Image (tube, helix red, strand yellow):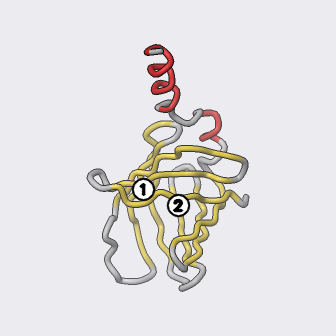
Amino acid sequence: MKYLALLAILFSSCNQDPATCQQVKTGTFTFESGSSLYKIVRTANEQSETNLTTGETSTWGVAWQDDCTYVITLKRRSTNTPTQYPTQTIKITKVTGNNVYFESHDGEHALLTGRMEKVK
């Protein structure tokens, strides 16, 4: 019985399959947060975000730490409003079809758990 519990813990702590994460490293995604809808376009080293509700845009540098984890660093925004988290680490936790589940943090605090949909 102890071995079954240990196996359950090991399997539950496994990371997302790197081959699956490769499929969502680049592309066009949509993401909802509160009452806003975002369009995200990510290349190998840059991510642009457009808030489709307000029209605000931002551009982020992307640095991949491993196949399923990347760091985004703010490069520029369309508004002069300072951002609370100019650097964030994003971990892809699951990919199911076109749905990409993720967690983000700023190094100290969990910021967001959510889902993006790959549209292209």
Classed neighbour count for the residue bearing mark 2: other residues with Cα under 10 Å, few (<14), some (14–19), many (≥20): many
Closer to the camera in the image, 3 or 75: 3
Q: Is residue 74 above or below residue 91?
A: below
In which quadrant will I find the C terminus?
Answer: bottom right
- Lower sequence index among marks 2 and 1: 2
Mark 1, Cα crowd under 10 Å, few <14 / some 14-19 / many 20+, is many
Report the residue at 38% width, 56% height from top: 88
Instruction: Between residue 112 and residue 47, name the one nearer to us.
Output: 112
**Whole-percent x and y of residue 21?**
60, 41
**Vertical position of residue 25 compared to residue 4: above or below:** below
* SS for callout 2: strand
Q: Position of residue 53 (x, y in %)?
A: 58, 83
Q: Residue at x 66, y 43 (%)?
A: 23
Q: Residue at x 59, y 75 (%)?
A: 37
Which amino acid lies under the numbered mark 2 shown in the image of this protein? Gln
Residue 109, placed above or below residue 70: below
Q: In percent of the image, x 52 and y 46: which residue is there?
A: 92
Q: Position of residue 65 (x, y in %)?
A: 43, 40
Q: CA distance from mark 2 to mark 1?
A: 8 Å
Check whether the beta carbons of the residues at disc 2 and disc 1 lie within 8 A of each other. Answer: yes
87 left or right of 9? left
The residue to which callout 2 is attached is: 47
Residue type, numbered disc 1: Ile
Q: Which of the two residues, 89 or 46, is positioned nearer the viewer here? A: 89
On residue 72, which mark appears? 1
Where residue 89 sits in the image (x, y, percent)?
Answer: 39, 51
Mark sitting on residue 108: none
